[in-house]
Image (cartoon, rainbow, N blue to C red):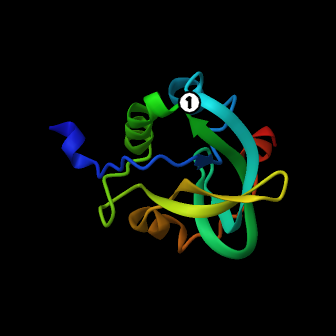
């Protein structure tokens, strides 16, 4: 069964998004629009973004990633998380994932911090960027406007 491929958690947490899942972006329209209780500006410290068109977050001391925290309606949580995992190519901890779903501390606009799920570049994906001299950036939406 297809759903058995995904490691699934019943623990609901906010989701920090930084790319195509941000409000107004393409994947937001298909997965998150209408499924959230609230959406809050936030950033992820000690990480940066690589990739053109599709961003990948990597750990990098002193950098930050601009995004939003999405609080999903509780009754929609299982379906939304499965859709997010499928979109991000996440098949469970230790798998050959496009992105890994991790819990990280993110900072809200008011300076407070919360724990949220973040999709970070998976091990296989990180190898795509290790031998490139590709610029990093902190804000996907601003980078797309250039």
Q: Residue at x 63, y 30 (%)?
A: 37
Taking the view exactly as shown, the residue that stands out farthest to the left is: 1
Judged from this view, the residue extending furthest toward the top is 34
Residue displayed at 78% across by 58% down: 112
Residue 101 horizontal/vertical position (percent): 45, 56
User: Which quarter of the rendered picture does the C terminus lie within?
Assistant: top right
Estimate the x, y position of residue 53 in percent, counting from the top left: 61, 44
Q: Position of residue 9 (x, y in %)?
A: 35, 50
- Residue 12 in the figure: left or right of residue 56: left
Please, what secondary structure does the residue beneath circle 1 have? Answer: helix
Where residue 119 sits in the image (x, y, percent)? 51, 54
On the picture, is 127 further left or further right than 2?
right
Q: Is residue 146 left or right of residue 133?
A: right
Quarter occupied by the N terminus: top left
> Which residue shows up at 57% across the image and 47% down it?
15
Q: In the picture, residue 57 is in which quadrant?
A: bottom right
Residue placed under numbered mark 1 in the picture: 32
At x 74%, y 56%, the residue is 43
């Amino acid at each position: 069964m297809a759903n058995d491929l995904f490691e699934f958690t019943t623990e609901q947490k906010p989701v920090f998004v930084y790319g195509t899942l941000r409000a107004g972006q393409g994947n937001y329209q298909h997965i998150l629009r209408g499924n959230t209780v609230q959406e809050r500006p936030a950033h992820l410290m000690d990480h940066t973004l690589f990739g053109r068109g599709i961003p990948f977050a990597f750990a990098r001391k002193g950098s930050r990633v601009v995004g939003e925290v999405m609080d999903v309606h509780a009754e929609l949580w299982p379906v939304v998380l499965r859709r997010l995992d499928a979109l991000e190519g996440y098949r469970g901890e230790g798998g050959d994932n496009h992105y890994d779903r991790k819990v990280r501390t993110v900072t809200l606009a008011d300076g407070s911090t919360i724990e949220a799920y973040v999709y970070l570049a998976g091990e296989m994906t990180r190898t795509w960027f290790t031998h490139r001299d590709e610029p990093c950036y902190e804000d996907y939406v601003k980078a797309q406007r250039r």
